[in-house]
Image (tube, helix red, strand yellow):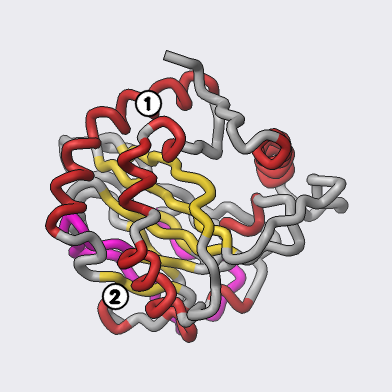
């Protein structure tokens, strides 16, 4: 399967070519130094979930643009959803770094009622060398208990006949979307330049947090419950105070 042929309803992910207009591409390029600056504050605090849209109002304007959310609805089939921009986190893959481990986002969110969509928006062109995202088609229909899995291999527990799909090549302004249970990760960055991408989370319905964030039983890796607990605290504070920001003030 080629990335361009992926369908959200069937595969759990899809490519959105030229999601950003020419104007939005110019604006996002101009905002990138500010995004990188504010990302340092979040990184210094060790937060796993960020709200960069609070720090960079111009970024929120791009991501809330009605033409963009209209494309999200059409591409995802969630035509009746009212997308709420929730979290924007910056991911960086440095030269030589291993890729992001295979995982399902919903596994690390302490909510049994999670209706959401993730937009992956790179801040530069992406090819096979600079850590492209990779997906496992159809994985949104399953839950893999033992995760994350090393990005250098294939996640165990799924049909071996299903090929993985790389999100490359992508031009600046292209994006991908995926469902909360879609298995994905990224390749190693084999270039000499950082690869940056925004992870944009939209809620399609109100999120209700579980009273107990951790999963019971010995089969769950410790890292899963560690991240669920950390995200539970961040999300609780965010819902209690929509103006809550975990990054240091300037």
Place of residue 103 in the rendered image (x, y in percent of width and height, measured from the top left): 54, 57
Place of residue 30 in the rendered image (x, y in percent of width and height, measured from the top left): 17, 37
Q: Going 70% across and 38% down the picture, which residue do you hit? A: 226
* Residue located farthest toward the top when viewing the structure as drawn: 250
Dominant secondary-structure state across the stretch colored magenta? loop
Place of residue 27 in the rendered image (x, y in percent of width and height, measured from the top left): 19, 44
Q: Is residue 5 above or below residue 123?
A: below
Instruction: Please identify the quarter of the rendering in which residue 232 is found.
Output: top right
Residue 238 among magenta residues:
no
Could you say which disc has been placed on residue 240 in the image? none
Instruction: Please identify the quarter of the rendering in which residue 23 is found.
Output: bottom left
At numbered mark 2, what does the secondary structure look like: helix, strand or loop? helix
N-terminal of the pair, mark 1 or mark 2, is 2
Q: Going 29% across and 56% down the picture, which residue do you hit? A: 132
Q: Which quadrant holds the N terminus?
A: bottom left
Would residue 108 appear left or right of 192 to someone viewing this image?
A: right
Residue 165 among magenta residues:
yes
Would residue 127 appear left or right of 6 to someone viewing this image?
A: left
Place of residue 168 in the rendered image (x, y in percent of width and height, measured from the top left): 23, 64
Instruction: Please identify the quarter of the rendering in which residue 121 is found.
Output: bottom left
Residue that label 2 marks = 3
Q: Going 63% across and 59% down the picture, which residue do you hit? A: 106
Would residue 136 appear left or right of 234 to someone viewing this image?
A: left
Q: Going 32% across and 46% down the picture, which residue do you hit? A: 197
Residue 214 seen anywhere in this rendered image of the structure: yes
Would residue 103 appear left or right of 115 to someone viewing this image?
A: left
Residue that label 1 marks = 38
């Amino acid at each position: 399967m080629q990335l361009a042929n992926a369908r959200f309803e069937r595969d759990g992910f899809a490519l959105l070519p030229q999601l950003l207009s020419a104007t939005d591409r110019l604006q996002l390029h101009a905002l990138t130094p500010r995004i990188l600056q504010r990302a340092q504050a979040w990184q210094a605090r060790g937060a796993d979930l960020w709200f960069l849209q609070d720090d960079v109002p111009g970024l929120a304007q791009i991501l809330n643009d009605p033409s963009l959310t209209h494309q999200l609805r059409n591409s995802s089939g969630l035509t009746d959803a009212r997308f709420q921009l929730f979290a924007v986190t910056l991911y960086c893959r440095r030269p030589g770094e291993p890729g992001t481990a295979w995982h399902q986002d919903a596994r690390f969110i302490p909510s049994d009622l999670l209706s959401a969509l993730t937009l992956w928006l790179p801040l530069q062109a992406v090819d096979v060398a600079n850590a492209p995202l990779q997906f496992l088609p159809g994985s949104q229909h399953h839950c893999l208990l033992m995760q994350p899995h090393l990005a250098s291999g294939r996640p165990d527990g799924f049909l071996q006949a299903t090929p993985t799909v790389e999100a490359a090549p992508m031009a600046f302004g292209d994006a991908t979307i995926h469902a909360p249970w879609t298995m994905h990760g990224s390749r190693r960055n084999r270039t000499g330049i950082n690869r940056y991408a925004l992870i944009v989370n939209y809620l399609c319905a109100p999120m209700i947090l579980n009273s107990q964030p951790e999963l019971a039983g010995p089969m769950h890796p410790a890292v899963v419950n560690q991240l669920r607990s950390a995200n539970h605290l961040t999300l609780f504070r965010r819902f209690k105070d929509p103006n809550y920001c975990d990054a240091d003030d300037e």
